[in-house]
Image (cartoon, rainbow, N blue to C red):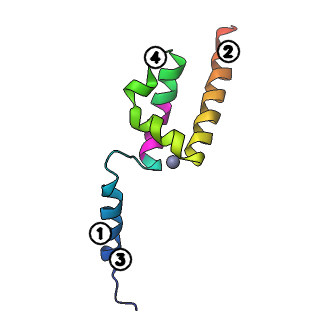
């Protein structure tokens, strides 16, 4: 007890995360989310451009909701913008 250093824990955590090489975390997903949504709105193949983001959104409820909210917000913003 009390002998595990935080650096050891970090190392362990890093190793666990590394085993899922093809998967990205919420942070990485979030960083690419605006780009992903932009591609969607442009009618481009967002899944092909950012496959890992797409996969993460399907797996992660939190990011999926974030994505839906961002998409909805941008869509209404665009609709309002083009009405000028
Ligand atoms: Zn996530």
Q: Quadrant of residue 32?
A: top left
Q: Residue at x 61, y 25 (%)?
A: 74
The x, y position of residue 2, in whole percent, is 39, 90
Q: Quadrant of residue 15?
A: bottom left
Is 10 located above or below residue 37 in the figure? Answer: below
Q: Residue at x 58, y 36 (%)?
A: 67
Whichever of callouts 1 and 2 sits on the residue coming sooner in the sequence is 1
Location of the C terminus (image quadrant)? top right
Q: Please say if the residues under marks 4 and 2 sit with CB atoms less than 8 Å apart.
A: no
Mark 4–mark 1 Cα distance, whole angstroms, equals 39 Å
Mark 3 Cβ inside 8 Å of ligand 1: no
The x, y position of residue 43, in whole percent, is 51, 15
- For disc 2, the neighbor class at 10 Å (few under 14, some 14 to 19, many from 20) is few
Can you identify the residue that label 4 sits on? 44
Is 74 located above or below residue 9 in the figure? Answer: above
Whichever of callouts 2 and 3 sits on the residue coming sooner in the sequence is 3
Can you identify the residue that label 1 sits on? 11
Label 4 SS: loop
Q: Which residues are magenta?
A: 28-34
Q: Residue at x 33, y 81 (%)?
A: 5
- For disc 4, the neighbor class at 10 Å (few under 14, some 14 to 19, many from 20) is few
Is 44 located above or below residue 33 in the figure? Answer: above
Mark 1 Cβ inside 8 Å of ligand 1: no
Q: Residue furthest bottom?
A: 1
Can you identify the residue that label 2 sits on? 79
Label 3 SS: helix
Whichever of callouts 4 and 3 sits on the residue coming sooner in the sequence is 3
Whichever of callouts 4 and 2 sits on the residue coming sooner in the sequence is 4
Which disc is residue 6 wearing? 3
Q: How many marks?
A: 4
């Amino acid at each position: 007890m009390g002998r595990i250093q935080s650096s050891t824990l970090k190392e362990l955590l890093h190793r666990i995360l590394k085993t899922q090489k093809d998967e990205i975390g919420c942070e990485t997903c979030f960083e690419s989310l605006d780009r992903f949504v932009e591609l969607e709105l442009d009618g481009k193949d967002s899944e092909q451009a950012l496959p890992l983001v797409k996969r993460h959104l399907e797996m992660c409820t939190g990011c999926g909701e974030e994505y839906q909210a961002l998409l909805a917000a941008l869509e209404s913003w665009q609709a309002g913008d083009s009405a000028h």
